[in-house]
Structure formats: C-alpha cells, structure tokens
Image (cartoon, grey):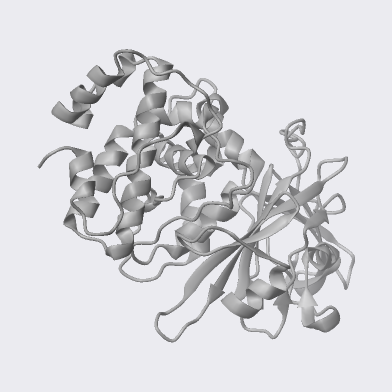
Amino acid sequence: MGTLRDMINALPGRFSFRHRTRNTFKLSFRRKKNKKKNNEAYEQTEPELLSYSVLTDEELTAEIIELKTLSDELGARSKDGYGPVFNIATKEIEKRLTPQIVALMLEKFFAPSFRLPSGINNPSKECFAIATMQALIACPPFIDFVKNGLSYLGNEKPSDRFLKIHHAVRSLVAKIQAGWSLIYCTELLDLLGFARKTEECAESFYRALYDAYLYKAFASPKEIKHWKCLHCGHVKVMEDNHARLQLAPIKGKDATTNIKMMVQYKRGQEKLELRCTQCDQMRVGTLFTTCVLSNIMMISADLLRKTTLFADFEDTVDMRYLEETPGTSEWIRGGVVHFEVTRLTKGHYVAAINKGRQLYLMNDGKSGSLVRDLKVVSDGHGDPRFAIYWRKNWETWNNGAGLNEGFEDASE
C-alpha cells in the first residue's frame, strides 16, 4: 500500500505535499539527529506497532508536526471528494494519535490567536454532535475537565468505555486547539452508539455524552420545589436530582423570553395542580424553586417549539436568586445550538459560540465566521434549541456538596 504520505500524494487534486514549517504552531523546538532514522521507521512499520512510549518530547513534537501536515494535506485533497483511500489515510492518522501525543498537543500546541475557530467536518448526518461539541468547547470548565479528567475521578478506577470516550474527546479538543483543518467527531459518536442513519437530536447527544462522560465532573442540576396550596397554605417540598432546566413559555417584550424571565417564573409564578395532603384532594398551588448547580449549565428552549416565542439567550446571567448555594452566581454563555428545517434535508444544526467578546457562527467544517448577535444566526440558520453556560468563578467555586442533605418534605 505504501506509506501514508504516498497514499495522500496519490489522491486526486492539484495540491502537492506541503513541507512542514516551524510557523505552524507557536512552539519552538530543535530536531534531533536521529529524526531521519525515526521517519524511516514510520515508513516501514505499522503505526499501531510503534513504541511511542520511548520517544522524547522533541521526537513526539516532530511526529505531531508530521501528522498535522499530513492531515492538512488530506483536508485539501478532500475537496475533490471522499473515497476508500481517503478513509484509510484518515484512520491511519488517528491510529498514530496516541494518548501520549494528544497529551503533548493539549499542553503545548496552540493555533495563532488571530486564527478563526476551527470547524469540525461532517461526513454524513453528524451536525447534531458537531454543534453541541462546539458549544461545549467554548466553556473553560469543560476544557479543564478534558485536560485533567482523570484527576476529577480521585481514587475511582475509570471504565474502559470512559477512557475511550475521554481519549476521543481529548483528541478532538487538541486538534481544534492546534488549528487542524481536518477534524471529525465520528469516533465519539460510535462510542456513544449513534448510528447516524437519520439526523439525530442535538439535545439527545448532549444527554448521552453527559450520562457517559460529563457526569464525572459536572453534577446534574438539582431542583428543590416548594409547592404551596392556594386553598389551605400547606407546603410540600419536592426534589428533582436530575432536573432539566428550560426557558419558561411566558411572553416578554417583542415576543421573546429569556433566562431572567425563567428565574422569575420559578420564584413563585409557576402554578401546578397536585394532591394536597392537608385538603385530601387535588388543588392548585404555586411553585417556589431553587437549584443546586455545577460549573456548566445547559438550558433548553424545547418548551417554546410549539409557541411563537423566541428564545433570547443572554450573554451573561445572574442566577443568585435561583441557586440554593449562597453567594454570587454569574454565568457566561459558551454557545447556543440552532436548528434549521431545510428543503433538502430534515434539518441542520449549527452553533453560535462566544470567544472572548466575539460571537462566531460554527457550521460543520467551516472556520468560524463573525456574526453580530444571535438574532442574525436565528434568521439564517433556525431557532435556538439550547444554550450551554459556564460559571464565571468556576476555578474557585465550592460546589456546595451536602448543602441539601437531610432536606425533608414539609408535608410530613
């Protein structure tokens, strides 16, 4: 079959193999004298049989530069279409991205600051996962978990499935961080069991990723609901340890609703009919809700789908009136996932992510494009489906473990 380089050069296209340069990354290094010997070994040995563990950081760096250059060349050739050789070459590159190489990429390899955010390629029906991952990657607590995930586990031994998902996510983030031009999340989807025969739901993907991976670092939102009977005043306390935070279907100005209105709604405006143990019959009561939140918060706009309301996800939100934990509760928007129904397909997902003070539209494999606000994204790419926020002081925040232990139902 020949070397990986020969395979790529044999693909159709007007591009030739581009020699790697030192300007590819903001990282200086010196090549070792035995680099030529290592190159010959790579050409003669199957990648999975290589002993990467004995390579130095300089040798690993040279291998990373080589793989990125091969990947960029393969990305340029992919404009002429996919095929068996392309798929084989892509898999060979992935095989050579060992955990040791990915760890070094996450530690030292960064694209220039002026580079636009990298897109994630969509071979077929993967936009639901691509948009969700772009929104997550825009959240610093998520990146910290990706880089230091095993330290979050303490003495717990991770399962083989968790380690495989962890490596797939780390590889994805490392490529985006380094500015690769050919990035996929196909391996992650396979590990999570998505067949991709039809367009999947982005929120379902987020929940699957949470159940298999994210839960190790970010506790599910917990809601503590105080229901007060409007007839007799009896109070019943209920807890939901796996709450789904959703924008409330209440109208604000210009037919919009936002998180601030959701907080107000949960602080006594919500009505619910339950059986009152004091009255011994069904009664309408008001709900007063508080939450225990982690460092990442996903808020859905699913309740708005059958209304004429528009979800207006704020840049920053104050959740202190909703959060059970005392103190400040400032949250920053990482990304918003939008969904558009099109004529040619059943639908398409994109993400609008915040990077610094800029808002970028992320549409599959395209580099990020600057947009003015979420309204522009909605007009061109469909309504927001959910947003992911991160806690502003996440590095110093105490997660409030045990604050609600022993919380009893007031009706008993």
Q: Is residue 195 left or right of residue 209?
A: left
Residue at 24%, 25% in the rendered image: 39
**Whether residue 218 can be seen here:** no
Please determine whether, in this image, residue 170 is positioned above or below residue 125.
Answer: above
Task: List the single residue furthest toward the left.
Answer: 1
Closest to the observer: 53 or 159? 53
**Whether residue 184 can be seen here:** yes
Quarter residue 326 falls in: top right
Closest to the observer: 109 or 205? 109
Q: Position of residue 86 (x, y in %)?
A: 23, 53
Closest to the observer: 27 or 108? 27
Residue at 44%, 86% in the rendered image: 343
Closest to the observer: 211 or 192? 192
Q: Position of residue 396 (x, y in %)?
A: 77, 30
Residue at 58%, 69% in the rendered image: 338
For the N terminus, the image quarter is top left
Please determine whether, in this image, residue 281 is positioned above or below residue 38.
Answer: below
Q: Position of residue 342 (x, y in %)?
A: 47, 83
Q: Position of residue 333 (x, y in %)?
A: 71, 54
Q: Count the marks.
A: 0
Q: Is residue 290 left or right of residue 296?
A: right
Q: Is residue 125 left or right of residue 26?
A: left
Residue at 21%, 27% in the rendered image: 42
Q: Is residue 320 left or right of residue 90?
A: right
Quarter residue 2 falls in: top left
